[in-house]
């Protein structure tokens, strides 16, 4: 891959003879950012779980606030790396213009959309969708297995929010015009962390970061192929359906990795799950090897003495840590430039930190898993969400596979017209995918409300 060919203003749905962006105020990549942030799919992230579902009186991060913060960090990473690439190659023209001024918008846009495909209730929602299709039995299983290809089946059995994000942004649903949100190929390629099909994904034995999960459904195979061809992203040698990562993906991923590691702990502190002493023990050691006076641990601890509120202390350290990690990972990106362009850097940027920092990150990871992600209240609500998603799928998928039943007809009337259903045997893949689109797009509260109504837990009022 070459830096010169890794960006384009071409969009999904563009005609071959389409002219350049006529907007004199906003560049093509800034328009990507605006299209995402004003979309209903992005807005619905406001009521989707980050870590602590439905937290009540104390406001902590949801998917929307998390995505906005990741976009902020991603913009800084894009700016830092773009400046270094522009200065190193000094090509001038469009090249310098893109890397110096546009790359920050590309990474910020990809970061905004990085969770847009996640179903309700966080990762437990993904697990619930996978489990439903893996555990389906009887006539419903026979119908699905007879109608779907191996890759199509894996789309459901290995449902992945990353793949769903690409679908949401590029699929037209029930609209006649193709291209979905019509984002640039550059932004979309910067979003796909695991550029492989569902059938090839979730293979940790390959040693490839691309197959850790999956990045596109069977329905988006052609779309991603077009993106890869336009940006000259190569396929992995000898592996059909698996591509090298676009280098910009590493920046999108790094912004997310930086944010959730510190912000999940900040939220846990606000909820009195983590003490301020523990928070400081986890993050202050990162500053011990700094030589710049204003970045040393001693300087930061001195500043903390002048802050009274515990939450403000945590916010200060969080801000300093994000700044430190942003600088370090931007430098690491350039240190691994040759591997990135060759498509063979098989680990994320955070994993490329020096051993001392890597050990500190590992300590944060282990603490978070033990005391935050498995916290009793989090687990209880995740289990409830698991049952809600599974219950909705049982009702709607059975109805789609048996559309002539009286009850099925009533159930399917609840599906928004945005998600077309044909009821034809030859369209079972598309119909089931529409139902998964419908359910995965719900907010946490809407999913709970609909589940209660169709199961009779709550009797709906006539409005």
Image (cartoon, helix red, strand yellow):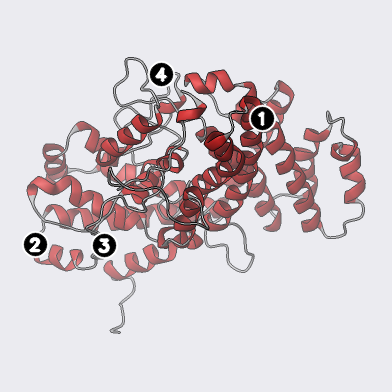
Mark sitting on residue 418: 3
Whether pointer 2 and pointer 4 mark residues with C-beta atoms closer than 8 Å, the reply is: no
Mark 2 or mark 3, which is nearer the start of the sequence?
Answer: 2
Q: CA distance from mark 2 to mark 1?
A: 66 Å
Locate the C terminus by quadrant: bottom left
Q: Which residue is mark 1?
A: 87
Mark in the foreground, 2 or 1: 1
| Outermost bottom residue | 463
Residue sitting at x 65%, y 43%: 76
Between marks 3 and 1 in the image, the one whose residue lies nearer the viewer: 1
Front label number (3 vs 4): 3
Q: Which residue is mark 4?
A: 206
Instruction: Please report whichever mark, 1 or 4, sits nearer to the chain's N-terminal start.
Output: 1
Q: Residues within 10 Å of mark 1 (few under 14, many from 20)?
A: some
> Is residue 118 shown left or right of residue 287?
left
Please state which of residues 214 and 341 is positioned toward the viewer in this rendering: 341
Crowding at dot 2, Cα within 10 Å, few <14 / some 14-19 / many 20+, comes out as: few
Q: Nearer the viewer, residue 68 or 152?
A: 68
Q: Earlier in the sequence, mark 3 or mark 4?
A: 4
Q: In which quarter of the view is residue 284 placed?
A: top right
Of the residues under marks 2 and 4, which one precedes in the sequence? 4
Q: Picture quarter containing residue 339?
A: top right
- The numbered dot on residue 405 is 2
Could you tell me which residue is drawn at 90 percent across and 49 percent down?
Answer: 303
Q: CA distance from mark 3 to mark 4?
A: 38 Å
The residues bearing labels 2 and 4 have C-alpha atoms spaced at a distance of 45 Å
Residue 346 shows up from this direction: no
Q: Nearer the viewer, mark 1 or mark 4?
A: 1
Q: Earlier in the sequence, mark 3 or mark 1?
A: 1
């Amino acid at each position: 891959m070459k830096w010169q060919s890794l960006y384009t203003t071409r969009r999904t749905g563009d005609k071959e003879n389409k002219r350049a962006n006529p907007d004199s105020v906003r560049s093509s990549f800034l328009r990507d950012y605006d299209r995402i942030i004003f979309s209903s799919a992005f807005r619905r992230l406001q009521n989707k779980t980050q870590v602590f579902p439905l937290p009540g009186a104390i406001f902590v991060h949801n998917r929307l606030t998390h995505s906005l913060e990741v976009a902020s960090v991603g913009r800084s990473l894009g700016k830092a790396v773009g400046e270094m690439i522009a200065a190193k190659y000094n090509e001038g023209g469009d090249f310098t213009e893109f890397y110096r001024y546009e790359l920050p918008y590309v990474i910020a846009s990809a970061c905004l959309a990085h969770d847009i495909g996640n179903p309700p209730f966080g990762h437990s929602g993904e697990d619930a969708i996978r489990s439903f299709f893996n555990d389906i039995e009887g006539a419903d299983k026979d119908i699905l297995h007879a109608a779907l290809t191996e890759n199509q089946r894996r789309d459901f059995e290995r449902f992945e929010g990353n793949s769903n994000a690409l679908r949401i942004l590029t699929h037209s649903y029930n609209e006649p015009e193709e291209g979905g949100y019509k984002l640039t190929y550059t932004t979309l390629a910067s979003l796909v962390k695991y550029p492989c099909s569902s059938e090839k994904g979730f293979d940790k034995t390959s040693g490839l970061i691309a197959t850790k999960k999956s990045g596109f459904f069977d329905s988006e195979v052609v779309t991603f192929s077009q993106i890869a061809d336009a940006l000259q992203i190569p396929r992995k040698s000898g592996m059909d359906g698996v591509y090298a990562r676009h280098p910009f993906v590493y920046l999108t991923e790094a912004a997310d990795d930086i944010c959730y590691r510190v912000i999940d702990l900040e939220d846990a502190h606000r909820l009195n799950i983590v003490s301020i002493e523990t928070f400081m023990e986890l993050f202050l050691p990162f500053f011990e090897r700094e030589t710049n006076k204003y970045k040393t641990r001693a300087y930061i601890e001195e500043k903390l003495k002048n802050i009274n509120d515990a939450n403000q202390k945590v916010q200060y350290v969080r801000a300093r840590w994000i700044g430190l990690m942003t600088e370090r990972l931007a430098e690491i990106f350039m240190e691994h430039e040759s591997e990135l362009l060759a498509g063979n850097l098989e680990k994320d940027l955070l994993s490329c930190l020096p051993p001392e920092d890597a050990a500190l990150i590992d300590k944060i990871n282990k603490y978070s898993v033990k005391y935050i992600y498995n916290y009793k209240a989090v687990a209880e609500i995740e289990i409830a969400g698991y049952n809600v998603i599974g219950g909705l799928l049982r009702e709607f998928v059975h109805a789609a596979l048996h559309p002539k039943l009286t009850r099925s007809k009533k159930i399917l009337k609840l599906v928004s017209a945005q998600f077309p259903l044909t009821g034809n045997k030859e369209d079972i893949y598309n119909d089931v995918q529409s139902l998964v689109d419908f359910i995965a797009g719900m907010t946490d509260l809407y999913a709970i409300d609909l589940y209660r109504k169709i199961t009779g837990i709550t009797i709906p009022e006539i409005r």
